[in-house]
Image (tube, helix red, strand yellow):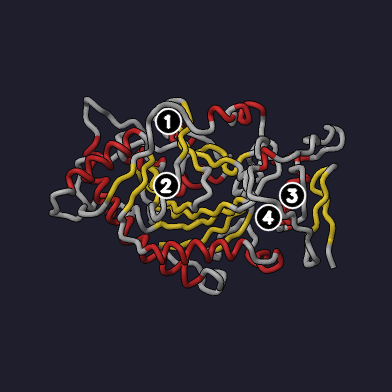
């Protein structure tokens, strides 16, 4: 029997195991469709904390809201005017003539003639954009396709199946939720997420949903090889030993997340993922064909246009610190999905595996002429601080500056 839960004073949605009303529309941007003018309930009747808690405890996620047939997004998803002003059509495609670098890794193995060229391309991309795409990376396309399809399949299962792993604690290594910073952010973003710990210790196998279990394990094997290769190239770009990042266990702490961005009925009032930087060393992203990922560069936002078979690489805050700002972590965001077709993306976050070790700028990269920009800290302190704040831009790196 279906249960009705109120999300805001003006929006009702259906949850539970009963039938849901699906809205079937052509694949056209939502911004071209009629919209409800109801945005916010009155301040007297609206209790944001209570509505956020009620939404979280329903375990339906954003997809459940969409499946219920809502035409107005709940008030706690509406972002402040200063954020929405930056989403105007004229800024959605970025500014300037720059494009996100695309680096061909073919022939980049040790001893090859192209390796020095690839190292130089990667060094320039990591020190300017902090974002680049790689092609001919060695990961079989069928592995990419299988893993992406399995993650999409997870998110499109009935709510009662997904609810078994709906939790904010990742103690078992598996957690499905909507918005990791739901209780800390000024406004929620229009997406659901499953995250699975890959290392140093793989999540409990029984906890990994069967629909994506084998695919996740296979994907992790590929990521370990690719990650080691990328970190070696980035080390050479810094002028340090090829295995320096590997020695710091920078590939051992791995978490894969799969974001699901269903169609948003009011995409001009919210975002898919608020602008932020990633906390770790390196992030490997696979995006589908729908698009929406943007990176900030030169004061504007550039689209990271999907390339079939390519992977997106972005530098994290920790690598910015370790490199003493030779490399830059990149602010990025995802626009709310304005198409009826859902957007799906996967990201593997690579971080050190030793949480109690001390990290800071590499001694090889500091000198009297260029002293350390950041103080030292443990990874436990670093990650605890990240997860206790709202996703935002450079507040984490700024906190550790000397």
Q: Point out residue 9 in the picture as x, y percentages from the top left corner.
A: 85, 42
Along the horizontal axis of the image, is 272 left or right of 53?
Answer: left
Give x and y (percent) for residue 295: 46, 37
Question: Considering only order in the chain, which callout, 3 or 1, is on the residue closer to the N terminus?
Answer: 3
Which x, y percent locates residue 244?
Answer: 24, 50
Q: Viewer-nearest of labels 1 and 3?
A: 1
- Horizontal side of 131 relative to 186 (left or right) equals left
* Location of residue 254 by image quarter: bottom left
- Camera-near label (2 vs 4) is 4
The disc label shown at residue 63, or none: 4
Report which residue position mark 3 lands on.
53
Quadrant location of the C terminus? Answer: top left
Circles 2 and 4, Cβ within 8 Å, touching? The answer is no
Closest to the camera, between mark 3 and mark 4, is 4
Q: Of label 2 and label 4, which has the lower sequence position?
A: 4
Question: How crowded is the residue under tag 4: few (<14 C-alpha within 10 Å), some, or many (20+)?
Answer: many
Q: CA distance from mark 2 to mark 4?
A: 28 Å
How many angstroms separate mark 3 from mark 2 (CA)?
A: 29 Å
Mark toward the start of the polypeptide (2 vs 1) = 2
- Mark 2, residue position: 280
Q: Secondary structure at mark 1?
A: strand
């Amino acid at each position: 029997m279906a249960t009705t839960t109120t999300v805001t004073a003006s929006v009702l949605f259906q949850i539970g195991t009963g039938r849901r009303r699906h809205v079937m529309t052509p694949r056209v941007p939502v911004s071209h469709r009629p919209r409800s003018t109801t945005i916010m309930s009155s301040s007297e009747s609206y209790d944001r904390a209570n509505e956020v808690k009620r939404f979280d405890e329903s375990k339906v996620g954003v997809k459940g809201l969409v499946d219920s047939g809502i035409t107005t997004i709940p008030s706690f998803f509406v972002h402040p005017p200063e954020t929405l002003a930056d989403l105007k059509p004229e800024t959605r495609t970025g500014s300037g003539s720059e494009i996100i670098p695309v680096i061909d890794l073919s022939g980049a193995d040790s001893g090859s003639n192209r390796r020095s060229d690839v190292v130089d391309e990667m060094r320039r991309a990591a020190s300017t954009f902090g974002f680049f795409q790689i092609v001919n990376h060695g990961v079989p396309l069928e592995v990419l396709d299988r893993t992406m399809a399995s993650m999409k399949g997870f998110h499109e299962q009935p709510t009662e199946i997904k609810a078994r792993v709906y939790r904010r604690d990742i103690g078992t290594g598996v957690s499905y939720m909507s918005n990791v910073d739901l209780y800390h952010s000024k406004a929620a973003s229009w997406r659901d997420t499953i995250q699975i710990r890959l290392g140093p210790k793989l999540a409990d196998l029984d906890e990994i949903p069967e629909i994506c279990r084998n695919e996740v394990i296979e994907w992790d094997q590929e990521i370990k090889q690719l990650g080691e290769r990328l970190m070696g190239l980035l080390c050479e770009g810094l002028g340090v030993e090829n295995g320096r990042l590997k020695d710091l266990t920078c590939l051992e702490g791995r978490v894969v997340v799969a974001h699901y961005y269903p169609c948003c009925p009011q995409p001009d009032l919210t975002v898919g993922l608020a602008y932020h930087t990633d906390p770790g060393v390196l992030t490997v992203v696979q995006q589908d064909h729908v698009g929406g990922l943007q990176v900030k560069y030169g004061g504007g936002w550039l689209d990271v246009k999907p390339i079939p078979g390519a992977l997106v690489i972005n530098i994290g805050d920790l690598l910015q610190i370790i490199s003493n700002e030779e490399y830059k972590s990149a602010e990025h965001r995802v626009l709310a999905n304005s198409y009826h077709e859902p957007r799906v993306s996967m990201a593997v976050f690579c971080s050190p595996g030793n949480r109690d070790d001390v990290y800071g700028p590499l001694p090889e990269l500091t000198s009297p002429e260029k002293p350390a920009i950041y103080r030292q800290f443990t990874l436990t302190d670093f990650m605890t601080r990240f997860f206790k704040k709202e996703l935002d831009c450079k507040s984490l790196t700024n906190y550790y500056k000397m």
